Amino acid sequence: MKLKVFLICTGMGRVMRGYESFAEQAFQALSKEPSLDIILFKGGGKAKAKEIPLWNLPRHTRTACRIAKYTKTSAYLIEQISFFFSLIPHIQTDKPDVIYFSDNDIGNLLAHWRRLTKQSYKLLFRNGGPVRPKAHIFNNCDLIQQIAPQHLQNCLKAGISAQKQTLVTSGAEIAAELQILLPSEKEALRNKLGLPEKTPLILSVGYISKSHKRMDYLIREVASLPEPRPYLLLLGHQDGNSPEIIELGNSLLGAENFQVRTVASHEVANYYKIADAFVLASVSEGLGRVFLEAMSYGLPCMVHDYGVTRYIFENKGYFGDFTHKGSLADLISQILSENEDKSKFYQRHHFIYERFSWDKLLPSYVKMIRMLTN
């Protein structure tokens, strides 16, 4: 008998983050499993087969921000609540067996609705943030998907039962074989994208701000390098916090050596193909899907040294202490001076494909979902 699964992501269709790219890829992968009837509910975009956009008040709109101000909450929570009310009719009509989600606020709302209406759907929470172990969602959901061993251990230490958790890491869309562009193809694609054809290109993908992703640290580290410096390209979601980063980059690096872009998720692949190295300056991540994406193209990746990055990269990354000035700059200089052979690109691709590709992980996801109904 097919299990009916609701996969929900309120930001999908408007925001480009790890949550949204995971939901999109998880839907595509799980839709191939004949034992599951999966429906994706998203906050924006077009309606497609088994993909349903729901009305909500997006977190970045003036209305959501005003309501949040008056209610002393957050615009993010307003988005979650409004999305939840749009989801209720589908729950009442379609009666899902499992609801799979990554945002803890909507998970708590779904748990309250289940108690109020005495329904039987199960709640599967992907702890991708990660959320602190004492959060209400851990009591309200039926199963917690931990995506890295560190998060599992933290919850066990906090007293959350091992029976309520499972370690299933994030799947990523990774081709079975790596295709590396020829130098002439790489230059042609850079030219098409309006980027310098021969200058070394450092790529970072993430929210354009100085908070979590620490784009300001990245800019200052590149600016500390002697000229000629590599070209720095930042890709990611922009909001009211982003102009500060753009101004800093233009000031320290110059518009001819720096750029910020926001592109559709399916367009990001072209940028991985033409980059020479990848960096994410954050000092903590739930997992960091962009790490998997960059490695899937064989790129040398510069990362802060902590438990999650050691779990992902083992000995395949370039590790530094990004709380210290000069640490990242040293790594960039090291990578650009190595001029490593392409065999390492293939090695990194194979390493990440075997551990994180949907091809390898799909059976674990199906087993996890079915655990809820056994």
Image (cartoon, rainbow, N blue to C red):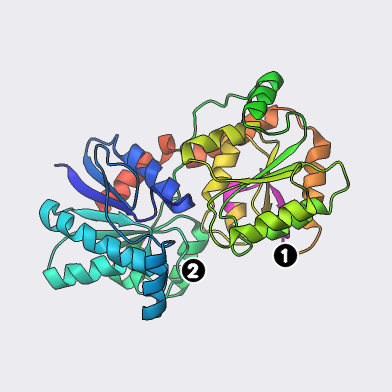
Image quadrant in which the N terminus is located: top left
Asked whether residue 319 is drawn in magenta, I would say yes
Residue 319, percent from left and from top: 71, 52
Q: What residue sits right under mark 1 in the picture?
A: 323
Give the answer, above or below, for where 38 lies relative to 282.
above
Residue bounds of the magenta highlight? 311-323
Residue shown at 45% from the left, 58% from the top: 128
**Residue 129 left/right relative to 295:** left
Q: Is residue 373 left or right of residue 329?
A: left
SS class, disc 1: loop
Mark 2: few, some, or many residues within 10 Å (few <14, many ≥20)?
A: few
Compared to residue 179, the image places residue 23 above or below, namely below
Can I make out residue 192 in this image?
yes
Which one is in front, 308 or 324? 324
Q: Position of residue 233 (x, y in %)?
A: 67, 44
Residue 70 point in image, percent of width and height: 38, 79
How many angstroms separate mark 1 from mark 2 (CA)?
A: 23 Å
What kind of residue is marked 2?
Asn
Quick check: marks 1 and 2 in contact, CB under 8 Å? no
The kind of residue on which mark 1 rests is Thr
Q: Can see residue 282? A: no
Q: Quadrant of residue 255?
A: top right
Q: Residues within 10 Å of mark 1 (few under 14, many from 20)?
A: few
**In the rendered image, which residue does mark 2 sit on?**
154
Would you say residue 251 sits in the magenta stretch?
no
Point out the tag, 1 or 2, that comes first from the N-terminus.
2
